[in-house]
Amino acid sequence: MIGLFLAIAGAALCVALAGIGSIIGVGRAGQAGSGVVSEEPEKFGKVLLLQALPSTQGIYGFIGTFWVIIKLGLLGGNAPDIAWQTGLMIFAACLPVAVNGLISGIFQSKVSVSGMNILVKQPQDAGKGVIMAAMVETYAVLGLLATILLIQGIKI
């Protein structure tokens, strides 16, 4: 059962760390966005987009967790007895999306806040702030893809 524990711990880490990155990211961007909207309420839609960008890391972490659940067949109610080595491989396979989600969510919020500064000072260039924040997203997506490919390569 230690193998199953390690695999489930990896899955939990996916959703927890990536979720923490999103929580911090959306919170920071929301704080900055509140200041913008309090002065210029008509900019709410653009501010909301910039605030929402760091939320995707939590979604990617959930997808990584779901991939492990599917791989283990846990939705069918049968918990497989896997070797500890297999559980450790699944745990390690979860790390790319977990760690990338945590870090990129935090840094994406910093870029989103900077994008809000663009929105305030140069409203016509607000899209540039969105593009810059989306660049950070690339690494969260790569972490998710790495996790999916690694999990798929593990034989149960």
Image (cartoon, rainbow, N blue to C red):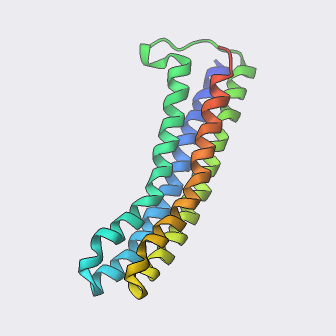
Nearest the viewer among 84 and 60 is 60
Spot the residue most to the front. Answer: 124
Relative to 56, say whether 52 is above or below. Answer: below
The answer to which image quadrant residue 123 occupies is: bottom left
Q: Please report the residue visible at 50 percent of the width from the left and 43 percent of the height from the top.
A: 60
Q: Please report the residue visible at 64 percent of the width from the left and 49 percent of the height from the top.
A: 99
Q: Please report the residue visible at 58 percent of the width from the left and 60 percent of the height from the top.
A: 136
The answer to which image quadrant residue 33 occupies is: bottom left
Q: Quadrant of the C terminus?
A: top right
Relative to 122, say whether 89 is above or below. Answer: above
Q: Quadrant of the N terminus?
A: top right
The answer to which image quadrant residue 11 occupies is: top right
Q: Please report the residue visible at 58 percent of the width from the left and 65 percent of the height from the top.
A: 107
The spot of residue 15 in percent (x, y) is 51, 42
Nearest the viewer among 144 and 76 is 144
The spot of residue 95 in percent (x, y) is 66, 41
Decide if residue 112 is in sight here: yes
Relative to 40, say whether 89 is above or below. Answer: above
The spot of residue 112 in percent (x, y) is 48, 70
Decide if residue 6 is in sight here: no
Relative to 66, say whether 31 is above or below. Answer: below
Nearest the viewer among 119 and 67 is 119
